[in-house]
Image (cartoon, helix red, strand yellow):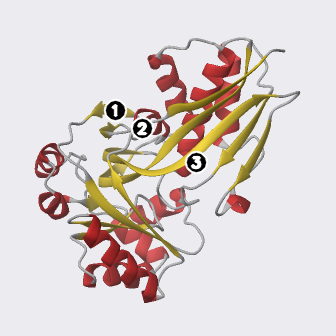
Amino acid sequence: MTTASVTVRVPAKVNVQLAVGPLRPDGFHDLANVFLAVGLYDEVTVTPADELRVTCSGPDAGQVPLDRTNLAARAALALAARHGREANVHIHIDKDIPVAGGMAGGSADGAGALLACDALWGTGASREELLEICAELGSDVPFSLVGGAALGRGRGELLTPLETGGTFSWVFAVADGGLSTPAVYAECDRLRGTTPVPDPEPSAALLAALRTGDATALAAAVSNDLQPAAVSLRPSLAATLTAGEEAGALAAMVSGSGPTTAFLTAGEAEAEKVAEALRSSGTCRAVRVTSGPAPGATVCGTARSSA
């Protein structure tokens, strides 16, 4: 019996803190990036094929690149190169994470394809090797592999797992179109001008709130240094944030580089109330309700053949 396909489920993320340091000579920024994985998932299935190809289904599938720029394709190529083989697989992405929404959907697909190809090919890559490849692919990809909650240093790829003491309820409002992450960082730099920027540090209050599972304390400590830039580039986000706050969200923020907005609530019932208000507000395209933390990339299915 040989493995005919492997399916990996991989979560979205929200940044409960995104502290952005000064611009580095290499064009990146040092970050103190506190990730929380949430229960919106893409499923990535890899199957042996004559050549590398990518397909995608689900909401916004038409916005997903299907060439070798896709992080899932790049992950397969990277693992294959390290192990002296061809990346001859069909990668199918069943997409449920908002596209270009600041929730690491592309990064999730990269991590999912990497884990799936490792299982399909039996390469036996260590966790350290997988994380090394993830870091080469992009700043958010390592966290997509790990999940849960973690502090990201460097560009966000140097991870320290964080303890969480409970489940946090979230509502996400999906905007029309996407925002370019590089453009948001550039706008952040422009808005800051010549003002000195301190080195980024995680909030002690925020880490304590995660550890104790205190949603009210977490709401008081969340922050996103990219939010002013995202709102500057997409002023309509301000109305979405206001609608969620007025509906009773404990905290309202842009998720990562946006344009998805995230609303922390006191519990599931409050999340449904905020979601309904956002749906009727006319300020967003879609609304999703979920919770975190969620597990990282996980093999959820394999198929066997006798060939």
Earlier along the polypeptide chain: callout 1 or callout 3?
Answer: 3
| Residue 27 in view here | no
Q: Which residue is drawn at 42% across and 51% down?
A: 39
Tell me where residue 30 sits by quadrant: top left
Question: In the drawing, what numbered circle is on residue 159?
Answer: 1
Question: In the drawing, what numbered circle is on residue 225?
Answer: none
| Number of disc labels | 3
Q: Which residue is drawn at 78% across and 45% down?
A: 67
Residue type marked 3: Gly
Residue type marked 2: Phe
Residue type marked 1: Leu
Question: In the drawing, what numbered circle is on residue 106?
Answer: 3
The image shows residue 144, relative to residue 116, as above or below, that is below
Earlier along the polypeptide chain: callout 2 or callout 3?
Answer: 3
Dot 1 crowding, Cα within 10 Å, few <14, some 14–19, many 20+:
some
Which element type, helix, strand or loop, lies under badge 1? strand
Question: In the drawing, what numbered circle is on residue 143?
Answer: 2
Residue 202: x and y, percent?
20, 46
Which element type, helix, strand or loop, lies under badge 2? helix
